[in-house]
Image (cartoon, coloured by chain):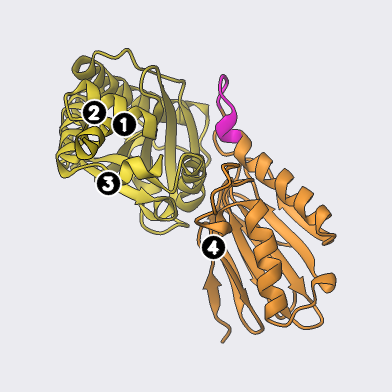
Amino acid sequence: MNSLIPVRMGELKISRPPDLLGCTGLGSCVGLVLYDSEKKIGGLAHIILPQAGKNGKEVEKPGKYANTAIPLLVENLQRAGAEPEKLWAKMAGGAHMFSFVTDNDLGRIGERNVEAVERILKELKIPLLSMDCGGKEGRTIKFSLETGELAIKTFQKGEKII
Amino acid sequence: MTEQINRLTPFQIDALRELGNIGAGNSATALAQFLHREIKMEVPSARILSIEEIPEIMGGEERPVGCVLLRMLGEAPGKIVYLVEEQSMQRLLTLVLGREPGECLGELEQSAMQEIANILSGSFLNSINKMTGFNCVQSLPSFVLDMAGAVLGSIAAHEGQFGNQALFLETSFFEGDHKIFSKFFLIPEPGSLEKILGAIGAESYEQSDSRANG
């Protein structure tokens, strides 16, 4: 029996087979998986916002922001024995759940999250193998550390694997 | 900003709860008139939640909920959220529309949900405006039916831009005969809290600060 490790908002966790890592109900948040398929070590970050404030203060919760969560996830994976240059990524989330005619900053968070993650992965030269982002629907995701498959479930459309 | 929420005194929390009480009382009356039913409400609570706790306030994060979100605009910006667990929503819509809603919510059903949230938030804001002298208005409502975690997580993410915590004025509304259970939240932005507290005569943070320093 493999166990599912939940990754809550602003958290990042790493594990090995036979475990699964999962996020329940991703809205505008992004679930980012980094995986070393040779060593079979992987991690999942539940990112809330694109970027930490630029006030120079130390970030209280680095897992919350794309620009602090991703380097930390790489570091933790490396410490656990993964090779940074072997890592690849998959991601899901970044939905635009509420639509307003006059005001769109609430809707734009998802989009901005996805843009930030893509940019940072490029900077770190981590290939993004697949993604399922945007749209209006929330997603529940499960990542298998055995197979490297990311299963995505939505309320209306059922399950798919990327 | 988060620090401000942490520094709320028990007196200030009580003042906010009382504001919520009066606002929610008004809303319950308005909803009762709209539905021609008796609406009961719980005594409102003023809760300080960390961003990570927000997705769980309806129970299971995968539970389907109907959610209407409105922005509170004017002197004290914030959000207004009306949440109904899916089965309750079906019963509520049956009551409003006089027939069972289809499996897929059509425009009429969505519009009915938005109208209910409009009525609740309009009457709530009215009483806040009366107490504070503000002229806050609400935006158009936006309706979503999805997993509670995803809906609330998106709201939490927006709050997360202000800090790691948010203040929720929460009221539960019931309709007993049809077992309709719903929750109404007013989430002022941290800057708005200060203005609301000042307007209702509950010391602002600055005042208590300068006293402590001087």
Contact, CB < 8 Å: mark 2 with mark 3? no
Q: Is residue B12 visible?
A: yes
Q: Position of residue A19 (x, y in %)?
A: 61, 80
Label the orange chain with its letter: A
Q: Chain of mark 3?
A: B
**Part of the protein shown in magenta:** A100-107
Residue at label 4? A11
The residue at the point 71 percent across, 57 percent down is A91
Marks 2 and 3: same chain? yes
Of all chains in the rendering, the one displayed in yellow is B
The answer to which of A72 and A11 lies nearer the viewer is: A72
On whether disc 4 and disc 3 are found on a single subunit, the reply is no
Residue occupied by mark 2: B197
Q: Are marks 1 and 3 in contact (CB under 8 Å)?
A: no
The reply to whether discs 1 and 2 touch (Cβ–Cβ < 8 Å) is yes
Eye-nearest disc, 4 or 2: 2
Q: Amino acid at mark 4?
A: Glu
Amino acid type of the residue that numbered disc 3 sits on in the rendered structure: Arg
Amino acid type, mark 2 = Leu
Q: Secondary structure at mark 2?
A: helix
Q: Which residue is mark 1?
A: B193
Q: Are marks 4 and 2 on the same chain?
A: no
